[in-house]
Amino acid sequence: MPAGPVEGAFRVVARHRFLPGLDLDRVYDAEAAIPTKREPDGEITSSSSAPAIMGLMLGDLAVEPSHRVLEIGAGTGYNAALLATLAGPTGAVTSIDLAPDVAAGAAANLVANGFAGVVVRAGDGWLGAADRAPFDRIIVTVGVPDLSPAWVAQLAPGGRLVVPLSLAAGVEAAVAFVRDGVRLRSLHLNPCGFMRLRGSHADPGWSGQDDGRAAFGRLGARRASGARGGRAAVATEAGAARAGTDEVTVSIGQLEVEAVPTAEFGSGPVGESDWVVARPSFTFLVRRR
């Protein structure tokens, strides 16, 4: 748990008030992600994330008093309460959840615990909240294989976006990005495993579970140095395997990621040691620090 304001927020906001009726040992287990909604087929579609990864992500987000914050994925409202505590009375927090019942439950929990000022909406988080923008900070609490252009457009210059990003099946990291023009550059990565995004941009073929190690041979891309003319040649996962892509395994924390709009990817340089992961909205240049 990061010391300072984040630790203070966790001490102020009681998690059990957002998870009533559960055993307190489980509620206050730092590694316990607690399912809060299941579909008829048994699929878990909402949960309260483990406090350990919440603390790391909030530490990287670095919310300050008066900040405007957007949260994608409302859950129980607990994380929004932490955000509101960090942003203070002069800040503003907006939380969006795809499921109307989840959004309503989060809103009720927030009101009951003294956080009526948090705006909770039911809607597609991929679209953000343009009428509440710009945001100093955006945090995504579901796993995604790509970044929404709306999030980046609604993020203030120099603002931070923290998002569980899947670079390949089995390689997921909570990436803290800072906006630099139309690009985003990572400040820090933490291994993680989140439920994946639902809604209009869900990817049913993706699995984001991660063991904290990244094998680049599975990233679905060739190294820039192997491309004709020194340019990156993006390949499918199967294509990369057939091409005999080198596999180099490193810790997630040793990586840095640069996100470039895919439509503009050809205009920028690619380093000799970059791995290139292309997605519809953004292309990710992954390299060792």
Image: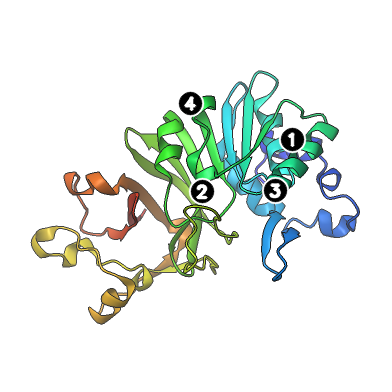
Mark 3 sits on what residue? 75
Residue 137 position, x and y percent, is 53, 33
- Left or right: residue 91 versus residue 259 is right
Question: Are the residues at dot 1 and dot 3 in contact (C-beta closer than 8 Å)?
Answer: no
Q: Which comes before the other along the chain, label 2 or label 3?
A: 3
Tag 2 secondary structure: strand
Disc 4 residue type? Pro
Q: Which comes before the other along the chain, label 4 or label 2?
A: 4
Q: Bin the neighbour count of mark 2 within 10 Å (Cα to Cα): few under 14, some 14-19, many 20 and up.
A: many
Return the mark for residue 92: none
Mark-to-mark CA distance, 1 and 3: 21 Å
Mark-to-mark CA distance, 4 and 2: 18 Å
Looking at the image, which residue is at 46% across and 38% down?
A: 151
- Left or right: residue 167 versus residue 133 is left
Mark 4 sits on what residue? 134
Mark 1 sits on what residue? 8
Disc 2 residue type? Val
Q: Bin the neighbour count of mark 1 within 10 Å (Cα to Cα): few under 14, some 14-19, many 20 and up.
A: some
Residue 4 visible in the displayed image: no
Tag 3 secondary structure: loop
Q: Which comes before the other along the chain, label 4 or label 1?
A: 1
- Depth check, mark 2 against mark 3: the one in front is 3
Tag 4 secondary structure: loop
Disc 1 residue type? Gly
Mark 2 sits on what residue? 163
